[in-house]
Image (cartoon, rainbow, N blue to C red):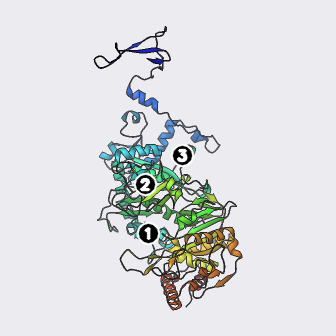
Amino acid sequence: KMASNNGSVNVANGNGSATKGLAKIQTHKKHNGICHDDSGPTVKAQTIDELHSLQKKKSAPTTPVTASQAPFATLSEEERHKQQLQSISASLASLTRETGPKLVKGDPARKSETQKVTHVHHHVTPTIDVSDSSLKFTHVLYNLSPAELYEQAIKYEKGTFITSTGALATLSGAKTGRSPRDKRVVKDDLTENELWWGKGSPNIEMDEHTFMVNRERAVDYLNSLDKVFVNDQFLNWDTENRIKVRIVSARAYHSLYMHNMCIRPTPEELENFGTPDFTIYNAGQFPCNRYTHYMTSSTSIDLNLARREMVILGTQYAGEMKKGLFSVMHYLMPMRRILSLHSGCNMGKDGDVALFFGLSGTGKTTLSTDHNRYLIGDDEHCWSDNGVSNIEGGCYAKCIDLSQEKEPDIWNAIRFGTVLENVVFDEHDREVDYCDKSVTENTRAAYPIEYIPNAKLPCVGPHPKNVILLACDAFGVLPPVSKLNLAQTMYHFISGYTALVAGTEEGVKEPQATFSACFGAAFIMLHPTKYAAMLADKMQKHGATGWLVNTGWSAGSYGYGSRIKLQYTRKIIDAIHSGSLLNEEYKKTEIFGLEIPTAVEGVPSEILDPVNTWSDKKAYKETLLKLAGLFKKNFETFTNYKIGKGSNNLTEEILAAGPIF
């Protein structure tokens, strides 16, 4: 007998054994004739489409009506949509046809939803006849949320999956890294004298006409699609100096990547976004025309500073957008007397800020991620009269060999909303294998900065106290830490040195010196000495100290000595942050003339002067001279350059701060 709370149910089967298979169930009903009524009212919908329409509610921004916003805030939603679409249509206008595409908001797959929306045609009398592209509508997917972008990516983009922690795994196609050789900058009357051109410069020229050919190609491709993704976002957390950017792309992956990497506007900010300061046309996999002047491959990344536009053809690698915008900031910010920096940045509990510069493999990410300090940002910053600010709204972390023990913050940030590029995962349980390089060694995760628990929001801070230049010296002759004067800081900042261990070939033990001006030569637009002079100026004005920290080898070069222990480097960084290192006694090294402390708390004193750690003193001296020679040769690129009028003394001063032998 089974009792239920509203009547009893008897299982009747005569002699206690089931007859003909199933038992017969009798229900003793209560007087009201209902057996435990759980039924709710039925839905208020006549069709399945109507039911689906009930599932989602409209999100409307609530705009505080201020005097400056009054005309815009009083617009009806329909008017606002129309203005938004007009602005996007103007962005996508073909310059020969002088018209933008007919735009409509929403996903073309959801026909019933999109038909209600007003469409817009950015209209000027066309100069040529009607074309097929002007007859069709282009659907705009505008500032979609991560959840909406997940749906788009999984439904329409091959090679997109959700991993076991909820991140979106994607493929960037044939290119798994940036293509610096395919990057072009328009050389015109404006940029010819302002930018750094020629030997050592990352800026390869193209003319205005060729840019327009490529722009037209990208715009025509985007307009031929059923739908495009449009992101309107900001760069730079310093609200006085932020830049409005618009990204038009063909893939949900690109839209989500930029959603994470740029600063996300509030609904109110989006309402009053207006015309962007800079626009990216990302045609992704669609190639450039190889017959076009200045093209060297089917990939082209083109920057036009006068038009404030960037065109991407023939590469789906999302990092091109991030670094393209970084190049733009390296031009726009110095024009406002703001220094743009390729650096990490963190802040202590007492508000002391440190900048970390360093090339790949020097420990920049590891050392700037510190649980006792707030993270302002991991990669791109501005230093203005207001202090420091992060340029980005997210982090783009390397994932190769990532482990929970070594990088817990990055590990935990790989969750819903995060884009994982080119990683390999188990086909069944979707667990990512971060050691697998099958697709590329350059596997990456892009996530919003608030996914890092000790991120400082908003990402701004006071003027830096310490400027830390990191080098992984595989030659083993640079001291673990040196205090730099201003001229030395400029010299080492312009040099941007590290030494990597060459290749994987057996028996290759010789380190390779790498120099990257301002620790980010691929992105600087002006001559390195201009950034260095600005850095020295700001350091002097705000009383910051420069440090050179070697995270590389000690007691011999690579293959003979050993890497300086991470715990010692951390102790050195702690002593810099606390200010205790300034109070130590210092002595000067030969050749490089670096000031080195005689003691650092928690670090064996004998390793502070590298000469002590080498058993072969003759080999030490030879290696030291060899490295000094490499520095000198690298610096020749910069010595012929004049920084403005009467700047010879500065160049002389910087040069004198280098190795003397």
The residue tagged with tag 2: helix, strand or loop?
Answer: strand
Q: Residue at x 64, y 79 (%)?
A: 485
Give the numbered dot on residue 270.
3
Read off the residue under disc 1. 187
Say which of marks 3 and 1 sits in front: 3
Res 91 visible:
no
Which numbered disc, 2 or 3, marks the residue that appears first in the sequence?
3
Q: Secondary structure at mark 1?
A: loop
Q: Which residue is mark 2?
A: 420
Viewer-nearest residue: 616 or 245: 616
Q: Which quadrant does the C terminus fall into?
A: bottom right
- State the image coordinates of residue 300 (x, y, percent, origin top left): 37, 63
The outermost residue toward the right is 583
Give above or below for 455 relative to 564: above
Residue type at mark 2? Leu
Question: What residue appears at the point 46 percent right and 13 percent down from the top-left corner?
Answer: 34
Q: Is residue 174 left or right of residue 565?
A: left
Q: Percent from the top left, x then y, of residue 495?
A: 52, 78
Q: Compare residues 96 and 407 and report the one nearer the observer.
A: 407
Taking 97 as reference, is 35 above or below it? above
